[in-house]
Amino acid sequence: MSHLKKMRKGWENEHLSRYLLSRISFLSQPITVADDLGVDFMCTLFRTIKVGKEEQLVPHQSFSIQVKTTRKAFRGDKQLNYLRNLEVPFFIGLVTQDRSGLDIYSGEILPDFFSWAPAEVSFILSPQQDAITHAHDGAWPTNKKGIFVLPCPYIGTLKVMDSPEDSGRISSALAAICSTTIRNIAAKLSEEYVFRYPSADGKVAYFRIQAGTGSINTFRGNFMLRLAEVFYNLRRIADIYPQQFSIIEFDLFEKEFLQLQSWSFPHADFVGNIYNDLSRTIQRRLQIRLLEILRRRQGQNGSGCGNCSPVSLARSTGRREPPEPELGLSSG
């Protein structure tokens, strides 16, 4: 009985890929055709830690990878539903027996693209050596047939002869991309649509806002939730670090909220609850401390300010608040 050579070659490539990936990650893979949904391996990167005299492997970031034998662009829409709903980072591996290596390319752009793409969309995944900045103007690139071409930048190469240090560098690069991609997957799932990408040196981030599509229905509510986060943090500062609290900063956000409140934006009631609680806290503390100041002044010169509102005194012209040591509040 004869055997197809190309099938044998495919198995060899699969075994080589499995070995190289196993040097930096725990692996799982489909065991039946029914389980094969579009990726060859699910991987979990590990870190090595010393426990007593032994080294232990600790799971880190997880990702999926599809292994190819050529660097040609290929149709990604054949796996449209799988890739659209995938909630782990996706990579492409190019295995080469002559170099005993696995080149790895990142599909980090997928969450961003699928936040914009219609339900039915044709696209190609294109492994490329050059880095991408993601700083395009929102128009996704297409080929002559009008099919979207998604660039998948090169990350690094795993080789059989790699030292542990070499493998560790590739593992670290994959972990960094996984962290970025997971944040972007979360942005898609939470309907916030603010996507972040590191620059080539890893120090400066690019931000892309995916306006339209889903974002056009959620940006108002998202903005109100950010205001709620602001007021919760200001209350936390007022409670725990009163010397760092800025009444001027509070005024800025207060004015923004009061203007938006009349528009009946989503979550306005939720934001209003924490705003009112914070406002009452500030009013109460200002009143108590300012009354103490007024009493001291009355005792010094025999005069009073019986008609003065403590809060209006704190926000009066030329003196937005009492001296910091007395009030415990910063002027910004």
Image (cartoon, rainbow, N blue to C red):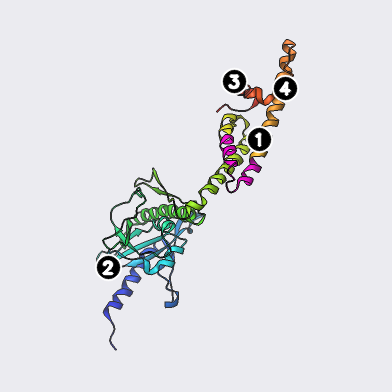
Q: Residues within 10 Å of mark 4 (few under 14, many from 20)?
A: some
Question: Which mark is nearer the camera, 1 or 2?
Answer: 1
Residue where numbered disc 3 is placed? 317
Q: CA distance from mark 3 to mark 2?
A: 77 Å
178 within the magenta span = no
Residue where numbered disc 1 is placed? 279
Which residue reaches farthest left?
A: 98
User: Tag 4 or tag 1, which sits nearer the N-term?
Assistant: 1
Task: Give residue 97's mark.
Answer: 2
Mark 2 secondary-structure assignment: loop
Q: Position of residue 109 (x, y in %)?
A: 38, 56
User: Tag 4 or tag 3, which sits nearer the N-term?
Assistant: 4
Question: Which mark is nearer the camera, 1 or 4?
Answer: 1
Residue type, label 3:
Thr
Q: Is 120 displayed left or right of 241 in the figure?
A: left
Residue type, label 1:
Ser
User: Tag 1 or tag 3, which sits nearer the N-term?
Assistant: 1
Assess whether mark 4 and mark 1 are in contact (beta carbons under 8 angstroms).
no
Task: Give residue 292's mark.
Answer: 4
Q: Which residues are magenta?
A: 253-274
User: Tag 2 or tag 3, which sits nearer the N-term?
Assistant: 2
Q: CA distance from mark 3 to mark 1?
A: 20 Å
Check the image and report above or below for 111 versus 296: below
Nearer to the camera, 32 or 210: 210
Q: Position of residue 204 (x, y in %)?
A: 39, 43
Residue type, label 4:
Glu
Q: CA distance from mark 1 to mark 2?
A: 68 Å
